[in-house]
Image (cartoon, rainbow, N blue to C red):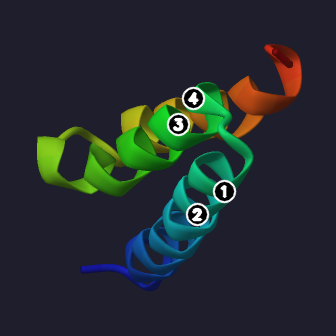
Amino acid sequence: MSTFALLFYIFTGALSLSYMVFGKKQGNAIAFVSGLVLGVIPYFGLEMWQMVLLAVVFMGLPFVLKI
């Protein structure tokens, strides 16, 4: 496992938890679902570039779709 992969997993895990807590407290379903998806992305077993691409999409989703 490379250093980049390890840091990526730690970063997405921390961001996942913060998005889920924020989404639950604020009643924001998009942030909660984004956090949930960010938490399970590493378990899909995709290539690293695919995981990074999905993570960037779901990191930005709550800012683009403000409801």
| Closer to viewer: mark 2 or mark 1 | 1
Q: In whole angstroms, how far apart are the C-alphas of marks 2 and 1?
A: 6 Å
Instruction: Say what amino acid the circle numbered 2 marks.
Output: Val
Q: In whole angstroms, how far apart are the C-alphas of marks 3 and 4?
A: 8 Å
Q: Residue 63, located in which quarter of the rendered image?
A: top right
Circles 4 and 1 in contact, beta carbons < 8 Å: no
Q: Residue at x 26, y 49 (%)?
A: 40
Assign a secondary structure to mark 4: helix
Q: In whole angstroms, how far apart are the C-alphas of marks 1 and 3?
A: 14 Å
State whether residue 45 appears in this view: no
Sequence order check, earlier mark of 2 and 4: 2
Q: Residue 25, located in which quarter of the rendered image?
A: bottom right
Q: In whole angstroms, how far apart are the C-alphas of marks 4 and 1?
A: 10 Å
Q: Residue at x 24, y 80 (%)?
A: 1
Q: In whole angstroms, how far apart are the C-alphas of marks 3 and 2?
A: 11 Å
The residue under label 2 is 21
Q: Dot 2, how many residues are within 10 Å of its Cα: few (below 14), some (14-19), or many (20+)?
A: some
Q: In the rendering, at what x and y percent does residue 27 appear?
A: 65, 38
Q: Judge whether 64 appears above or below 58 on screen.
A: above
Q: Residue 5, located in which quarter of the rendered image?
A: bottom left
Instruction: Say what amino acid the circle numbered 3 marks.
Output: Ser
Q: Which mark is residue 25?
A: 1
Q: In whole angstroms, how far apart are the C-alphas of marks 2 and 4?
A: 11 Å
Q: In the rendering, at what x and y percent does residue 54 appear?
A: 49, 31
Instruction: Say what amino acid the circle numbered 1 marks.
Output: Lys
Instruction: Say what amino acid the circle numbered 4 marks.
Output: Ala
In this view, the residue in front, 30 or 63, is 30
The residue under label 4 is 29
Q: Residue at x 86, y 19 (%)?
A: 66
Sequence order check, earlier mark of 1 and 3: 1
Q: In the rendering, at what x and y percent does residue 58 appear?
A: 59, 32
